[in-house]
Structures are given as structure tokens and as C-alpha cells.
Amino acid sequence: MPVSLDFIGGVIGFAFTIMILSYLIGDNPLYRIASYTFVGVSAGYIATIAYWHVLLPKLILPFISGGSSERLLLGVPLLFSTLVLMKISPRLTRLASPAMAYLVGVGTALAIGGALSGTLVPQFFSLINAFDADIATARNANFLEELVEGGIILAGAISTLVYFHYGAKKHSEDGAVKRMGLIELLAWVGSIFIAITLGVIFAGVFSAAVTALIERVHVVLLFIFSLIGPV
């Protein structure tokens, strides 16, 4: 009787699901094998995608068949790619420092630029619009509600920024350095906003984890029922 690929995939998925769920009884070799397999497969998949969709069509093939000017331009990323590979050897790892510094610098710049253009600037203009009665009227919105919402957002933004301000010049009787009373009050309000934000994030992560757990348990049950057959 030939074995179908769906059956093999079901067996593998069932086995790895049980191995991952075995962590409920503590760290054990089955969980480690499943974790290492997941990390290895993920790394192999990412490396394969990077090779076939980035390195080969955008670096290797153009460098081989391109003109002299194109090869000259591609020489820089090719050199940096070679330098990154030097981290494999402990003796040559210092040669990879320029390439790694460039990658970190570019990644940081992209992250900051993305945060500014995608989050801070839109939030800034949205906050300004919340205090504009004409915009609220054009959107058929209640200006009082927009004003209250904008005030809460403004208070949260300012108090959260103040929370991370650690400069202080005031000394207490015991010699400890303390911030001004107003700064301390705003920092306390900012800690409340931060706690609410972290709570919402944790609730989202927990909800996603529970959803994934329910989905995997459902898959396991379906696989078991498929083996048992109709009762």
C-alpha cells in the first residue's frame, strides 16, 4: 500500500508538535531536537532564498556577464560579502569589521528613517489635526471627542519621553540625586502609559500564542481521527 505525501507530512507534523509540547513537562532532548531542527531549517530556507533571489540574480550573474562599469560597481558589495565570510575564521574575523560596521550603520539608519517617516511624523501630524476644529468638522467628527483624544495622546507622548529623562540636579537630605517634582510627576504618568502599552503588547502576544496552540492541537486531533477512521 503506497504511502501518500500527505500522510508523511501529517506524521512529521504530529511528531514535531508533540516534541514542542513536551516542553510543558520541562526542558528535554525531544524539545531541543525540535528547536534545533526548526532553527536549522529556517536558516537553510533563508540562505536559499537569499542566494536565488538576491546574490545570484543581482550580484553573481551581473558581475559575470555585465560590462566593466557594472562590474566595478558590483565589486564593492562583492568585496564586503567576502569580508563577512571572514568571520568564519577566528584569525580573520577582524577583516569583517568594516563590512559589519557598514551593515550596522545602514540598518540603523533605515530603522531610524522608518520610525520617523512611518510612525513619529504621521503621529505628530495626527496629533496636530486633533486640535483643529476645521478638520474635525470636515470629517464630521465630534470636536470635543477629538480634543480629548488628542490631549490623552499628547500627555502620553510627553510623559513617556520625560520618563526616559535621567538628568537631575536636586539633592535630597540623604545625598541621593532626585529630579524636580514636576519631572517626577510626569515620569510617573509616563510609567502608567508604558505599563498600559506593554500590557497590550503582552496580551496580543499571548493571544497569538494561544491561537497557535489551539491550531496545532486541532491539527493533532484531526490527524489522530484520520488514523482511527470514522467511529
Image: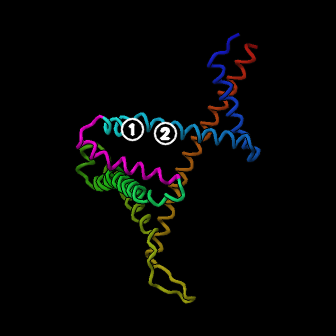
x and y, in percent, of residue 48 in the image:
48, 35
Q: Which mark is residue 15?
A: none
Region in magenta: 65-88
Whether 68 is among the magenta residues is yes
> Does residue 207 appear left or right of residue 47 in this picture?
right
For the residues labelled 2 and 1, say whether their Cβ atoms are less than 8 Å apart: no
> Does residue 34 appear left or right of residue 187 in this picture?
right
Q: Is residue 69 above or below residue 84?
A: above
Q: Which residue is mark 1?
A: 54
N-terminal of the two: label 2 or label 1? 2
Measuring 63% from the left and 24% from the top, which residue is drawn there? 9
Q: Is residue 105 above or below residue 77?
A: below
Looking at the rendering, in which quadrant would you find the C terminus?
A: top right
Whether 26 is among the magenta residues is no
Q: Residue furthest top?
A: 1
Q: Is residue 182 above or below residue 171?
A: above
Work out how far the residue at label 2 is from the one at label 1, CA to CA, in angstroms: 10 Å
Q: Residue 217: name its quadrant.
A: top right
x and y, in percent, of residue 124 in the image:
31, 56
Measuring 51% from the left and 36% from the top, which residue is drawn there? 45
x and y, in percent, of residue 3 in the image:
67, 15
Measuring 60% from the left and 36% from the top, which residue is drawn there? 212
Viewer-side residue, 136 vs 215: 215
Q: Which mark is residue 47?
A: 2
Residue 145: tell me if it is visible: no
Residue 77: tell me if it is visible: yes
> Does residue 127 appear left or right of residue 7 in this picture?
left
Most common SS among magenta residues: helix
Secondary-structure class at tag 2: helix
Q: Amino acid at mark 1?
A: Val
Crowdedness near tag 2: few (<14), some (14–19) or many (≥20) residues, C-alpha within 10 Å: few
